[in-house]
Image: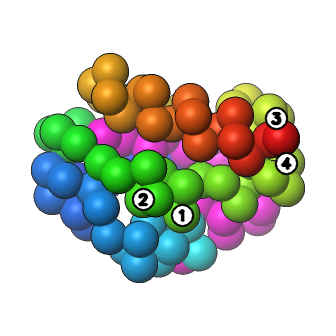
């Protein structure tokens, strides 16, 4: 499964409600109910807020830890978004 962040949020991913919708309707059901790998694609997304990333992925990392990274891949992230993802993952697994 490929989840395009641009398709739901345009080039600035900031809306926590959109992140929660992606998490609850796509990310968690796919992760829990299939063996399918998930690509979260940030193509054409220029920036994001930490709260968006947190709402999107923290729940999975809190419940499943580092194992999430065996099934989820983050693609087309610029350096700022990579940094936010890393921060949220590290925080979520504390």
Say few, some or many: other residues with alpha carbon within 10 Å of mark 3 (under 14 / 14 to 19 / 20 or more).
few
Q: Which mark is residue 67?
A: 3
Q: Is residue 1 magenta?
A: no
Q: Nearer the viewer, residue 42 or 54?
A: 54
**Comes first in the chain, label 3 or label 2:** 2
Q: Which residues are magenta?
A: 25-42
Q: Dividing the picture into quarters, in which one does residue 94 lie?
A: top right
Q: Which mark is residue 33?
A: none
Residues marked 3 and 4 touching at CB (< 8 Å): yes
Q: Measuring 69% from the left and 34% from the top, which residue is drawn there? A: 90
Q: Is residue 43 left or right of residue 5?
A: left
Q: Which residue is mark 2?
A: 52
Q: How many angstroms separate mark 1 from mark 4 (CA)?
A: 16 Å
Residue 28 seen by the camera: yes
Q: SS of the residue at dot 3?
A: helix
Residue 34 seen by the camera: no
Residue 79 against residue 75 in the figure, above or below: above
Q: Nearer the viewer, mark 3 or mark 2?
A: 2
Q: Is residue 82 left or right of residue 9?
A: right
Say few, some or many: other residues with alpha carbon within 10 Å of mark 1 (under 14 / 14 to 19 / 20 or more).
some
Q: Which residue is mark 4?
A: 64
Q: Is residue 59 left or right of residue 7?
A: right
| Tally of numbered discs | 4
Q: Which mark is residue 55?
A: 1
Q: Nearer the viewer, mark 3 or mark 1?
A: 1
**Comes first in the chain, label 2 or label 4:** 2
Residues marked 1 and 2 touching at CB (< 8 Å): yes
Q: SS of the residue at dot 1?
A: helix
Q: Is residue 35 magenta?
A: yes
Q: How many angstroms separate mark 3 from mark 2 (CA)?
A: 21 Å
């Amino acid at each position: 499964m490929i989840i395009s962040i641009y398709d739901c949020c345009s080039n600035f991913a900031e809306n926590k409600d959109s992140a929660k919708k992606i998490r609850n309707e796509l990310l968690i059901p796919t992760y829990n109910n299939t063996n399918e790998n998930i690509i979260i694609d940030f193509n054409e997304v220029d920036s994001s807020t930490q709260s968006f990333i947190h709402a999107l992925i923290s729940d999975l990392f809190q419940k499943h830890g580092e194992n999430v990274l065996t099934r989820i891949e983050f693609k087309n992230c610029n350096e700022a978004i990579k940094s936010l993802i890393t921060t949220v993952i590290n925080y979520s697994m504390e």
